[in-house]
Amino acid sequence: MRETERIGSLKGIGEKTENLFRKVGVDTVGDILRYYPRGFEIFEDPVPIGSVEEGKISTVAGSVFGRIQVSGNQRMQVTTLCLKDLTGTIKVIWFRMPFLRNTLGKGGVLFLRGRVVRKKDGLMMEHPEIYYPAAKYEEKIHTMQPVYPLTAGLTNNAVIKAVRQALSCANAKTDILPEELSEKYHFMAYEEAVRNMHFPKDKEHFAAARERFVFEEFLVFILSLRQMKEAENRAKNRFVLADQEKINGFLEALPYRLTDAQLKVWGEIKEDMQGEHVMSRLVQGDVGSGKTVVAFLALLLAGLNGYQGALMAPTEVLARQHYENISGMLKDYDLPMEAQLLTGSMTAAQKRGAYERIQSGEASIIIGTHALIQEKAVYQELALVVTDEQHRFGVRQREALAGKGAMPHILVMSATPIPRTLAIILYGDLDISVIDEMPKNRLPIKNCVVDTGYREKAYDFMKKQIAQGRQCYVICPMVEESESLDAENVMDYSQTLQDEMGGAVRVGCLHGKMKQQEKDAVMDAFGRNEIQILVSTTVVEVGIDVPNATVIMIENAERFGLAQLHQLRGRVGRGKHQSYCIFMSASKSDETKERLDILNHSNDGFFIAGEDLRLRGPGDLFGIRQSGILDFKVADVFQDAKILKNASEEAELILKDDPELGQPRYMRLKKHIGSKIQKIMLETTL
Ligand code: ADP
Ligand code: MG
């Protein structure tokens, strides 16, 4: 048997089962070897009946004591028996299995494995698995039985049978890892490792086998990304953008000077866009580091060269803010081009107008939400796509927007401070620039962590700031995972706060349930200082820029992740005034204290992210988990960070040694990478 043969060529797999396997992504014999269990059942020694514990899954062994009874009605027949060993008896019941009375009534020792529950007349075992005759259990004792991910109609047993057969074709010849790597890291031999992934001898053997495949999975993934990146990098730059004197003029006229870090990154972007190959670059910079103006320069360069550029934001509020900001700059600095907004909530007529201006080329800078990637938007000549705060975007959306032009330049802006190892995985296909310096006019934000008893004082403090002309955010306490409850809560809160503040101060509110126009109106009013206090859910978290706001008070701070709190705090400290962040928390737990303390003492996003990772462990940091791209079969980027590092170093070495992977020892690896790339491409097209 060969790995490439259809799964249907295994014994006992007919057309129906073959289709079921196909549904779970198993087409060939080789595929099933890589169809790993999602967990294992461990078959322990039976426990004495006298010492079973409530709530646990246990195995008991004994003989039937007394009669086996079947009661209940036709629809729900209940079979009951008592099992007895030297230490006691336990009642056992099954539902809808009346035939058991005959099969189990023949005497002899019976092994039952199931959950022990407490009912009014004592402990009993509910619906256990039956091992009869006893040898059926004894052969499994101390083994780990695989539990596979299934689909309706496909049983665990069917998978086990198929894997058992397929194992015969797992030999060194089908191993894809080059031998010298197996040796270097002392990996378990391929054949043994495959066997132990499915039917491990014990936990230690499984761990050893798993390590090998984690490494393999990372290696294949990184090499695939690298090859994709190479292919893209090799893609010719169809939009070579010439330098424009107007840009220097704009930079001179700006009221501030770009920081050295901004200039360096702008230089890298320009070099890319003027180079031989198309750009795909990630710009990382902490909140407030000034990414928007850098993105604007890139869009400007595209526009001045007669092309179009698009800027995609994760929320409508943010898209509109960018639009207003950018069209304001175009006008104020006398830059000869038009900006166009395109968002989902625009009326049909507005959209039609927008599509027209986009298609005719009248609009050079197009700003919007995911509406930008809808089919109806046809661009005249799209040379650049910028996505802002991209951790909120799926990879697919990015790729789809890229597909609107003939390989436009791609620029991704992100405030998410991602540790280096993760960046390799998430952005392995991008070059990375970092804005690692804050504008000079900034005073560091002053932080404090207080309990709810401080609330009155906080309100007084806000009044004083407002009297000096400043503005404030209050991030409202979260109630539940329910948007309507949160909305209600925000409204109540702002009403109470309004009463507290009196007529001279206007309190506005913002929450996810509001219509887009209402949100825009509130944001506009806040931007013009017609509203002095904005009470909001976390809607404001991403990117909003109102430099005149100097206070942010976060209620229930203990309920947010550190990275999110850091993003929220980033809404202030964006201008020349001293800013303040008040973390309000009712929680007295040490863990909360430690977490908030980190924020209290640091304004550095990278440091905070690292601490978050340390405290929370492999949690779903920054929502990265949901991005799909991290769905590895066995590997876990957090837990296996060390293997990831090794694999990425080896990938470098391999590519240095043989960029095309042409040597015979890389042959199987190369084939594997080919199909992995195909899969990634498939997953990233809409
Ligand atoms: P972010 O990186 O979080 O997207 P923004 O681009 O929104 O930050 O910039 C935050 C604020 O800083 C904006 O009001 C912007 O005008 C201002 N800004 C950007 N660059 C500089 C600079 N070099 N000096 C002073 N202010 C700057
Ligand atoms: Mg921003």
Image (spheres, grey):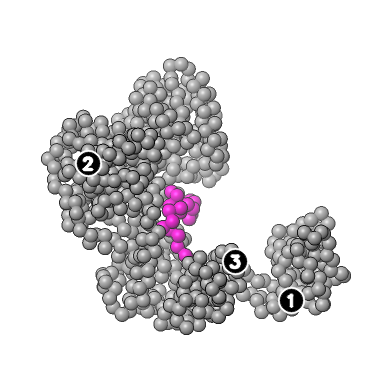
Q: Earlier in the sequence, mark 3 or mark 2?
A: 3
Q: Which residue is at 47% across, 25% downward?
A: 459
Which residues are drawn in magenta? Answer: 613-633
Q: Residue at x 52, y 38 (%)?
A: 483
Which of these two is toward me, 160 or 550? 160
The residue shown at (50%, 26%) is 494
In the displayed structure, 517 sits above or below 12; it is above
Left or right: where 335 falls relative to 92: left
Camera sees residue 90: no
Mark 2, secondary structure of its residue: loop
Image depth: mark 2 or mark 1 in front: 2
Residue neighbourhood size for the residue with mark 2, other residues' Cα within 10 Å, grouped as few (<14), some (14–19), many (≥20): some
Image coordinates of residue 427 in percent, x first then y, are 34, 56
Q: Is residue 620 on the magenta stretch?
A: yes
Position of residue 52 in the picture relative to residue 213 (left or right): right
Question: Which quadrant, please, contains the C terminus?
Answer: bottom left
Where in the figure is residue 627, as x and y percent of width and height? Answer: 43, 53
Q: Secondary structure at mark 1?
A: loop
Q: Which residue is mark 3?
A: 153
Whether residue 362 is visible? yes
Residue at image coords 81%, 70%? 101
